[in-house]
Amino acid sequence: MSNATFTSRAAKSLRNSQLRRNINKATTTIRGKTARVTAELPDWEALRLAGREIKRSTLAELDKHLIALEESVTRAGGTVHWARDAAEAREIVVRLTKAHNTDQVIKIKSMTTDEIELNPALEGAGIRPYETDLADMIVQMGREKPSHLLVPAIHKNRVEIRDLFRDQMGSHGEGLSDRPTDLTKAARAYLRDKFLETRVAISGANFAVAETGSVVVVESEGNGRMCLTLPDVLISIMGIEKVLPRWQDLEVFLQLLPRAATGERMNPYTSIWTGTVPGDGPREFHLVLLDNGRSKILADEVSRETLHCIRCSRCLNVCPVYERAGGHAYDSMYQGPIGAIVTPQLKGLEEAGSLPYASSLCGACHEVCPVKINIPQILVHLRGKVVESKRETALGKLSGENMAMQVASRLFNNQQALEWSLWAGRLGQKLLTRDGVMPWLPPPLSGWTLSRDFPALPEQSFRDWWKQRENGK
Amino acid sequence: MSSRDIMLATIRHAISRPAPDGLPAVPPPGDLPAYRRRLDATGPEIVDRFLERLRDYNVHVEVLDSEAAVIAAATARLAALGLDRLVIPADLPAAWRPAGVTLVEDQALDHQTLNAIPGALTGAALAIAETGSIVLDGGRHQGRRALTLLPDYHLCVVFAGQLVGLVPEAMDQLGRHPARPITFFSGPSATADIELDRVVGVHGPRTLDVLFVTGPTQPREF
Ligand code: SF4
């Protein structure tokens, strides 16, 4: 993927005004709610710090915790599988499914299964995967890609959804209106049949506790509970970074995640299960531990904290670039600021090297992230790597850009330095600006403006504006 | 080498590098920032908060001053809703069993049978005031998960003595039996997937009613 492709995909989204209106509405609503329910906890900041420290210390001894998890899951009657990459994970899931002589599976929202492109592999093996999350089902019926981490079907309007349902839900879709309540009712009835007749379910996992072998799924619709409870066989796929050492750690993340994600004090349903329990739920449980590039991220000390991410999508909701570009522009299930750092690291800089540039480095994502991931710092770090790899091929051509990024990288190490430098930059640029664009910059930044105009820093930084706006509420 | 060995070796290689300058060292486990582990509030305040949260979620709550009032309240509520058949866990106390409705004890009923029963009546493991959550763990009076999942209506008896303030207090108690299958519910299932219109009641019971007993309470051990 080249730099031009993010830009061209984003340009396409910008023309789609329905999409922009919807995303605007989505982000504004969720932003207000998350701001309210995070502000109401006097210890929100302490919880964030605790979340970050748990993640940091867990990753530092990740091998140990994974072995403990394997032991406890096995003790509880489950089976653990290790998958180095997407191909191996697909092979494991397809093999386990086929062993049960079934031609369909039900799935609960899982970015990990999207990441490993499981559905085409299942279809190739003659197994039909049914997405059971309403939005994922809509996206699947339309044969599209999700456009938003939390509301993946936000690009579809009700009439389009009704048409899909009429088309593909058999008797449940007959004579259907386009009212969201009717559409939801039809989905409930259609999926209930699937839940009752399907013997194998595939899920992701939000957390897994090494100490006890317990796995956690956090959700809103209840399709998760159905998938986790009714089938005979449950296969859960989790990235290796999802492990938590102790049961007690859950109390931190079960507070952080719902408040940051949907702005609820608690999401409607949370399920925690441990292996298998006679007479309650699946008789067979498989947990697939997926690496697929995560250990590479782990090896990079600066971007390691990418793996702290609990996929709440709060950084998307505050991102001015995401708000304008839309999710499809990121060409991945990981979108927005977190996508801009995850995808290039998972897919490689050659393929997704433009994504670290899909940001204005305003820092809003870092400010709201429930586990305090310093996304701007990682973006700058990755840009440095892109430039480095380019320089190897076109020697020295971009040295100015390289230097600019190194300067910025130093600035972003420290919150105060960043605020100071943005402030200083706004004062300094008055002398340089012409038509809102700075045609040249003082060295060492001048090399950077040879290849592009540096957009003038706004009078008020996004962060200042944000602070003012939130305080004014 | 197995995939397991390769993955573990790769991870060990990745984490064996020292942390770069300027990044704080990994703190020893247990040394976490002090977030609240108990809600600093009186009993009545905690009850009030819980009831307020339930009302926020549009849950119908009836506050009863003793366990003896459960049967009458349940009977009246079911009559008002026109429900005449309920599934119950086999260990549901006789003192909670409403009159005038058919009660089906769950003796390993199959899923289709459960699916055809309109409602369920159970107790709970505990409840959390701060989040308005009711938690089931398959312990006493709760039955297995499918029992409170397939019927469209759930009537749940919760005692004030089962109420805790914050999530950490709940996790402490649940941690005594972590291997039990645990379900938190906090408000009705919901989706905003279609044009962000919030629609309530996607899967699972679309109606949750709570009988909240403040008076003399059933023993808290579970
Ligand atoms: S990076 Fe932070 S804010 Fe963004 S999805 Fe991950 S946890 Fe949430």
Image (cartoon, helix red, strand yellow):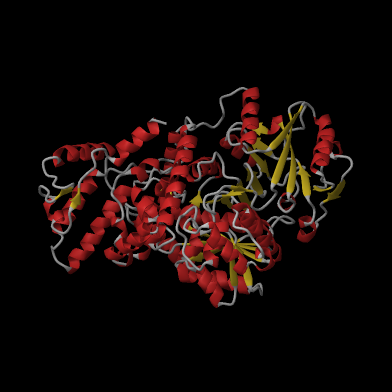
Vertical comparison of A102 with B210: above or below: below
Residue positioned most to the right: B100
Rendered-image quadrant of the N terminus of chain A: bottom left
B200 or A105: nearer the viewer: B200
- Going 50% across and 49% down the picture, which residue do you hit? A244
Q: Where residue A5 sits: x, y (%)?
A: 31, 65
Front-most of A323 and A289? A323
**Depth order, front residue of A97/B208:** B208
Task: Between residue A276 and residue A427, name the one nearer to us.
Answer: A427
Q: Can you say which quadrant of the picture contains the C terminus of chain A?
A: top left
Q: Quadrant of residue A468?
A: top left
The picture quadrant where one finds residue A412 is top left
Taking the image as shown, residue A352 lies to the left or right of residue A270, namely left
Q: How far across and down, in percent of the image, does residue B146 sit?
A: 72, 53
Q: Is residue B186 left or right of residue A22?
A: right
Residue B19 visible? The answer is no
Residue A336, placed above or below residue A428: below
As drawn, A148 above or below B39: below
Q: Residue at x 70, y 30 (%)?
A: B161
Q: Is residue A272 visible?
A: yes
Q: How many marks?
A: 0
Quarter of the rendering containing residue B217: top right
Q: Position of residue A41 (x, y in %)?
A: 49, 32
- Specify whether A167 is left or right of A257: right
- Percent coordinates x, y for residue A393 in the rendering: 18, 69
